[in-house]
Amino acid sequence: MAQGKWISNLKPDTPLVEAARHVLFVRLQVVRDYLPRAALEADKDIEYVHQLRVSTRRADAALRIFAACLPKKNYRKARRRLRKLRRAAGAARDWDVFLADLLHREQTADAKHRGGLDFLIGYALGQRAAAHAALEAVYRKEGPTFEVFLARTIDSIRPPNEPSSPTVLVDLARPILFERLKELEQAALGDLSDYAQLHQVRIAGKRLRYAMEIFADCFDPDFHTTLYPRIEQLQEILGRANDSHVAIERLTALRERLQALCPTAWPRLQPGFEQLLRSHQRRLPQERRRFLKWWNEWHPTGSEAVMTSLLTPLS
């Protein structure tokens, strides 16, 4: 099974079309390998769904990076197909994470809070089953023809039409990484008390991270070993913030429905609900503060280090 995040066997002077074929084949191959496992074997290992979700994101990032090397029709079709898989995997993964957190908390819950947690575990199991059934349905439709899709996508790659387009990999890497870095900085300068803005920072960080994984071998080793882990840390912080944001939305909506539909049962369920909700309500601002600490350490020194790497030829 295809593994890993890094794209090897690339050099700064690798011809652009050759790089596009190699990168897109590797990225789509990982999607192909995880798709049946995520759809059919998720109860054996929930990481299969996580890896499918991440691999579709990485593949989509590669498509965007090498868009100029693909006919528009093939590019749009490929992105639509990956989006369908990513959304199905994302829904299943969200419920996997929510359920795993509940099961962990139940191990140390007291009698007062167990009623609410037990209810939520049952609810999450039902939602997870529905999400995984939807993922399997997508697999039944897309899986049998994914190999053909992969081959056709690779076969459609050709040199960009624009005469001024880059011809070697490093000449594509620099402007894209500069752009991704600028997107991250612009997002981080917004109102981070608004979760929607914090989410934009997370998206910008992902886009930078996935580009760095493709272009790492074009630059000094510190780009890989020092700068990349700092972006990875950013994603971990904002990933936890996202998990709490999703949990808060779910718990708030479900609490309102239960209070309306099951008023006699609510007093028994309330302590477990409220404790879990408060926990996520505390964690979200904590992760926001961790991000601000990360940003103050990264900017401007981190940005300057990235730019220095982009401007320094690989020796």
Image (tube, rainbow, N blue to C red):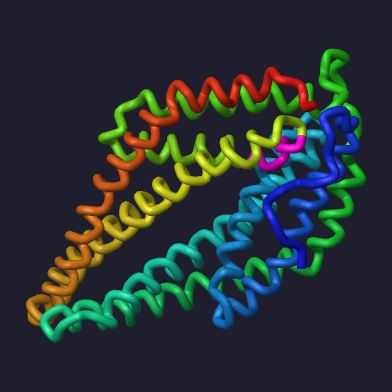
Instruction: Say left or right for 38 vs 255.
Output: right
Q: Main secondary structure of the magenta part?
A: helix
Q: Nearer the viewer, residue 63 or 307?
A: 307
User: At 61% from the left edge and 70% from the top edge, which residue is drawn?
Assistant: 48
Magenta segment, which residues? 210-217
215 magenta-colored: yes
User: At 87% from the left edge and 23% from the top edge, which residue is drawn?
Assistant: 167
The quarter of the rendered structure image containing the C terminus is: top right
Q: Residue furthest front?
A: 315
Q: Indicate whether 179 appears above or below 204.
A: above
| Residue 133 x, y percent position in the rendering | 55, 75
- Choose top left, top right, bottom left or bottom right for residue 97: bottom left
| Residue 109 x, y percent position in the rendering | 20, 80
The quarter of the rendered structure image containing the N terminus is: bottom right
151 magenta-colored: no
Q: Indicate whether 292 appears above or below 49.
A: above
User: At 63% from the left edge and 73% from the top edge, which residue is drawn?
Assistant: 39
Q: Nearer the viewer, residue 176 or 246?
A: 176
Q: Nearer the viewer, residue 160 or 279?
A: 279
